[in-house]
Image: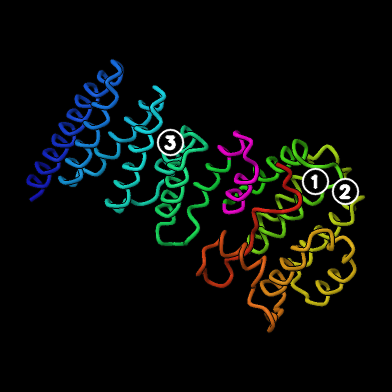
Amino acid sequence: MAAAAAMAEQENARNGARNRGGVQRVEGKLRASVEKGDYYEAHQMYRTLFFRYMAQSKHAEARELMCSGALLFFSHGQQNSAADLSMLVLESLEKAEVEVANELLESLAKLFSLMDPNSPERVAFVSRALKWSSGGSGKLGHPRLHQLLALTLWKEQNYCESRYHFLHSSDGEGCANMLVEYSTARGFRSEVDMFVAQAVLQFLCLKNKSSASVVFTTYTQKHPSIESGPPFVQPLLNFIWFLLLAVEGGKLTVFTVLCEQYQPALRRDPMYNEYLDRIGQLFFGVPPKQTSSYGGLLGNLLSSLMGSSEQEGEDSQDDSSPIELD
């Protein structure tokens, strides 16, 4: 019995080695075609091999071949062919029902980083990649993939989209550092407090207390226009500081008094009180308003960012604000 199992294991190892060797040989021929400039021929051959491997349930081989092919086409400036093979990488992951792993997420993020930022293929790729990465555990995508996407977009100085992905990651420190750069590069000095206030409120609306606290502490420590605190010169920063303390305590009276006392600062952005309504429900037991089901501006923002049928508790960030000065 043991001998039979050992023989079967050896046979599987030999088959695996043969498969890898076969893939490497094929890859070598395809690489030669690309190097010669036969891009169309090589692209079609990649596609043919992909569907052949998939029909044989060789999902890993198909994925590896498409990934290396995409990287090769990117290196030769063949954006369309590279993007097409990148989509086939995702198709192999979807059909193989592969478990989400950090290595795979990094591979997808690498492909994303090489795509033309203005191409429609990139939008389709990231949407599909996030859907796969959720792995059935959530609707918003894996936090690690969001983090990797945010870092790429930050490098491209696409601060608005970078912020969106940071909000769905667990990287409060990275988000804060990006916001410092965003504020100094695109914002007015009078708005330094608004950049971090928005992020903290949005993290809290996503029930991410930890990242809300980290983004606030890191931003206020590192921003060159913010004097050391708390307390701070800017009332809005003092409000956010007190709010984070109140969220930990969970006392409704503290939250209510805090919101009343800082209304002048909160009136600077009409969205602040909308966010605070939601935060009151999540952390202080405030019942939802009877007269509103998050219609109007907030409803539109929630629908566009969270999906139109998200469950309660997964709400609230907007990608358009008076402080985005693109």
| Magenta segment boundaries in residue numbering | 151-168
- Tag shown at residue 220: 1
Which is nearer the N-term, disc 3 or disc 2?
3
Left or right, residue 11 beside residue 89: left
Amino acid type of the residue that numbered disc 1 sits on in the rendered structure: Thr
Q: Are marks 1 and 2 in contact (CB under 8 Å)?
A: yes
Residue on which disc 3 sits: 111
> Horizontal and vertical percent for residue 186?
75, 39
Mark 3 residue crowding within 10 angstroms, few (<14) / some (14–19) / many (20+): many
State how far apart marks 1 and 2 are (Cα).
8 Å
Q: Is residue 306 left or right of residue 17?
A: right
Disc 3 to disc 1, how far (Cα)? 34 Å
**129 in relation to 264, above or below:** above
**For the residues bearing labels 3 and 1, Cβ distance under 8 angstroms:** no
Q: Examine the structure image and report whether residue 166 is included in the region drawn in magenta.
A: yes
Q: Where is mark 2, residue-wise?
A: 229
Quick check: 165 above or below 13? Answer: below
Determine the image quadrant of residue 47: top left
Under circle 1, the secondary element is helix
Quarter of the rendering containing residue 294: bottom right
**In the image, residue 22 above or below residue 226:** above
- Image location of residue 93, percent across then percent down: 32, 48
Q: Residue at x 17, y 29 (%)?
A: 22
Mark 2, Cα crowd under 10 Å, few <14 / some 14-19 / many 20+, is few
Q: Position of residue 97 (x, y in %)?
A: 30, 54
